[in-house]
Amino acid sequence: MTKKTPAKPTANVGIVIVSHSPDVARGAADMVRQMVGTSIPLAHCGGDPDGGLGTSVPAIMAAIEAAWSPSGVAILVDLGGAETNSEMAIEMLDDDRRDLVVICNAPVVEGAIMAATEASGGARLAEVKAAAEELSPA
Amino acid sequence: MSSTDAAQTGLTIEALTKAIDAVVATIVDHASELTDLDMAIGDGDHGLNMKRGFEAVRGAAAKIAAQTPADALKTIGTTLIMTVGGASGPLYGSLFLAMSKAVADRPIDLVVAAEMLEAGIQAVQSRGKSHAGEKTMLETLIPVGAALTAAGPAADPAALTAALKAAAAAGAASTVPLRASKGRASFLGERSIGHMDPGARSSELMVGAVCDAFFAPAP
């Protein structure tokens, strides 16, 4: 099969959305899909291990796996525990994957859309993170 | 474990198991108190999260009983990380993982225990990007670590228990007038003043339970 456009040098960066609320996580992911499309790996998770409001390290690890890209994965989080649990999930990944996952210091919905937009253009992981973080006060 | 036994053989898994049971029991018993504290300045999930985590630790009791104390602490840490569901999972999980690592194949006497706790406190600070004075569990753990270190290798069990419990109680109480700058409570700013930090309280409960399990005279 011959492609009309040259292939990108690497796969697009994946995006993971982590919220305390499963509904917020799913809703943010729905917005990314509608506004950015399907050219990026995207996964979301929310809720504690019993299904209440909170976040879960195993669920975050599964979401990173689902959105995995050899170019890396950018995580958007809502509140404190989501960040701490995401940091923990990253540390529990295999050595060769750990350095390819970053947490963006950005508002979760807007940051996810900005990061996904940047990722859909083939940007590198650092550029995706920077695009999301432009939304945060310095 | 008496301090004499500890000096000769180190902490046994039987003694550690008894302490774990006591910690689980106190966290479960105080879950609603921890939740009430957290509702005042956080998101009200600390009690339920800790209860879930420590009940999962209780569920791993058979595995823990067959492990060395160091491996048992690692099992506890990993279990908390995977089941708590809030920031306290990685924070308490990192505490136990670092304590496990600090054992370094030595028998656990009071000196090693003090080193373990200091390593655990470092891990909590690193995980939470926090330090003393920010209205967190560190307000309890840091003075308890200092008291354990100061006690030395041959401390009298009753005196040590009293010193550690006093340090924990004073530490937790010291969070009441503090203004939170870490975690969810930091969003409240000045309004966080006047409430005890739930993590400092849960740490106080654990310290008390561990002291009673290790050092209380047999009935």
Image (cartoon, coloured by chain):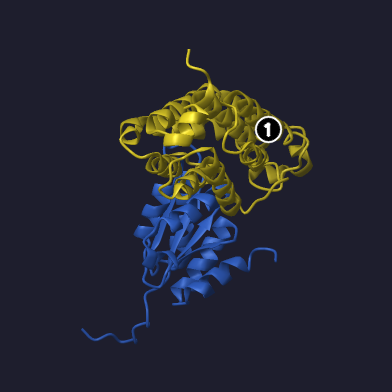
- Is any atom of residue A14 visible in this view? yes
Quadrant location of the C terminus of chain A in the rendered image = bottom right
| Residue B214 point in image, percent of width and height | 50, 27
Residue in front for this viewpoint, B111 or B168: B111
Q: Which residue is most to the left?
A: A1
Q: Is residue A30 above or below residue B8?
A: below
Quadrant location of the N terminus of chain A in the rendered image = bottom left
Q: Amino acid at mark 1?
A: Ala
Left/right of residue B2 with respect to residue B204 in the rendered view? left
Residue in front for this viewpoint, A60 or A31: A60
| Residue B97 point in image, percent of width and height | 46, 47
In the rendered picture, chain A carries what hue? blue
- Is any atom of residue B44 visible in this view? no
Residue A14: quarter of image: bottom left
In the rendered picture, chain B carries what hue? yellow
Residue at point 34%, 87% (across, down): A6
Q: Is residue B97 above or below residue B164?
A: below
| Residue B59 point in image, percent of width and height | 35, 31
How many numbered markers are drawn?
1
Q: Which residue is mark 1?
A: B167
Residue at point 54%, 69% (across, down): A129
Left/right of residue A84 with respect to residue B185 in the rendered view? left
| Residue B201 point in image, percent of width and height | 63, 31
- Residues packed near mark 1 inside 10 Å, few (<14), some (14 to 19) or many (20 plus): many
Q: Is residue B26 above or below residue B127?
A: above
Q: Which residue is most to the top?
A: B219
Which chain is mark 1 on? B
Q: Secondary structure at mark 1?
A: helix
Residue at point 48%, 25% (across, down): B22
